[in-house]
Image (cartoon, rainbow, N blue to C red):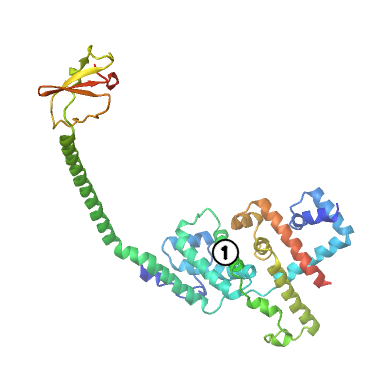
Amino acid sequence: MTLAVRDDLRNLGHAPSTPFAGLEDAQVVQAFLAGRDRAFDELVSRYQVRLLNFIYRTVGDRERAEDLVQEVFIRIYRHLHRFDQTKKFSTWAYTIASNLAKNELRNRSRNPLVLFQTIKRHWEADHRPLQFEDSSSRPDDMFRKRHLRELVEQSVAQLPEHHRVVFVLRELEGKTYEEIAEISGCNLGTVKSRLNRARNNFASIIAPHLD
Amino acid sequence: MNCCEFREKYSDFADGLLTSSESAETGTHLATCAACRRFDAALRAGLDALRALPSVGVSRGFGPRLRQRLRGELAVHVPIVARWSGTVGTLLLVATVGFIGWDLLDSRSAHRDKAAAATAWSPASLPLAATRPNPSHPDQRRYSADLRFDAFHPLNSILVSEDIRPTTAGDRLRFDVPAVWGGP
């Protein structure tokens, strides 16, 4: 592959329509490995938002989540030739993302920082940035919605790290138990037990606020 | 079924992974227990709210930043290997040939040193065929041999120990050596 061909990395992640749009992930991966560099744009555009949301819900810091998504794509790019093509590409990508998110949480627990989200929780209402919401909704509904949104975000953030990863993968990313086991490197029994505990914790945290 | 058992099975129940009889039992408990119904309702409402959270999108700078980093990857990996692979290969070849040559020279000089050492230290060759029992020796298992000086013989080295009893007779040396040395 020449550098000139690689220069086609233009419009990365923003390609409106590519010749790979209708292809399966595995076919796009094969196209990239065969030297069609624009196939990587397709993988980025398919996964950037999904991976960002997964990492963001796991680490709770948007800026850092974006850095980690960049790192995921760098690793994918660097090691795609070693990817076992009998496996699902999405599982591999999520495995990399999950490992990076876990490392981030581990590093953070060693070097604790006060996160913006932590400060934000204690803000007065006047300090909140202005948000334009649907004016057709009643004010109490809007307040309730916003309150519930913050509540669920905080409830997820309160889950222990290894429960949170499994919970987010299942409830937000819709992964199967088998996929979660592969992504998190646990056996099926561990995944089930972690998910059950995470659901119980989540319900226990949120239940008193819903009455 | 009590509430603890219900909570243990809840996840599998929610995902439809229980057998039909277990599922029916769990469903019956849910219908009759107000606390577990509240738990179930809280979880469902929480999950609905969680799934309704707005999706986070990548920032405007994400694509250009990633592109720049990927170019950096290429600069590090592909061109260096491509540009320098011929030179590196040549250097490796020269280094390999040099190493082999040096090794050959070194082994030859080591061989010469060994021969010189043999000249300096080995007094005689040991013609084992010449060994014969020494009936005059008190230990009958010992053999004695007449030795000729042959300083350039490659095997001309002998360990001098207490078991070897050299005696002289004119220009010849006589050694009494133990039978364990393998005399005839």
**Residue A20 appearing in the image:** no
Q: Give the quarter of the figure containing the C terminus of chain B.
A: top left
**Residue B77 appearing in the image:** yes
Residue type at mark 1 is Asn
Q: Nearer the viewer, residue B152 or A89?
A: B152
Residue B142: % across, % down: 26, 17
Residue B77: % across, % down: 38, 65
> Residue B150 appears in which quarter of the rendering?
top left
Above or below for B130 versus A81? above
Above or below for B113 versus A197? above
Task: For label 1, count other residues whose C-alpha is less than 10 Å away and answer few (under 14), some (14-19) or many (20+).
Answer: few
Above or below for A73 versus A123? above
Q: Circle 1 sits on which residue?
A: A103
Q: Nearer the viewer, residue A71 or A173?
A: A71
Residue A134: % across, % down: 73, 84
Question: What subunit carries mark 1?
Answer: A
Q: Is residue B105 left or right of residue A32?
A: left
Q: Is residue A114 left or right of residue B64?
A: right
Which residue lies at the image location 25% right of the left edge and 58% below the top edge?
B91
Please tell me whether mark 1 sits on a helix, a strand or a loop.
helix
Which residue lies at the image location 63% right of the left edge and 57% below the top edge?
A180
Q: Nearer the viewer, residue B12 or A66?
A: A66
Which residue lies at the image location 88% right of the left edge and 59% below the top edge?
B33
Q: Residue furthest top?
A: B135
Residue B62: % across, % down: 52, 76
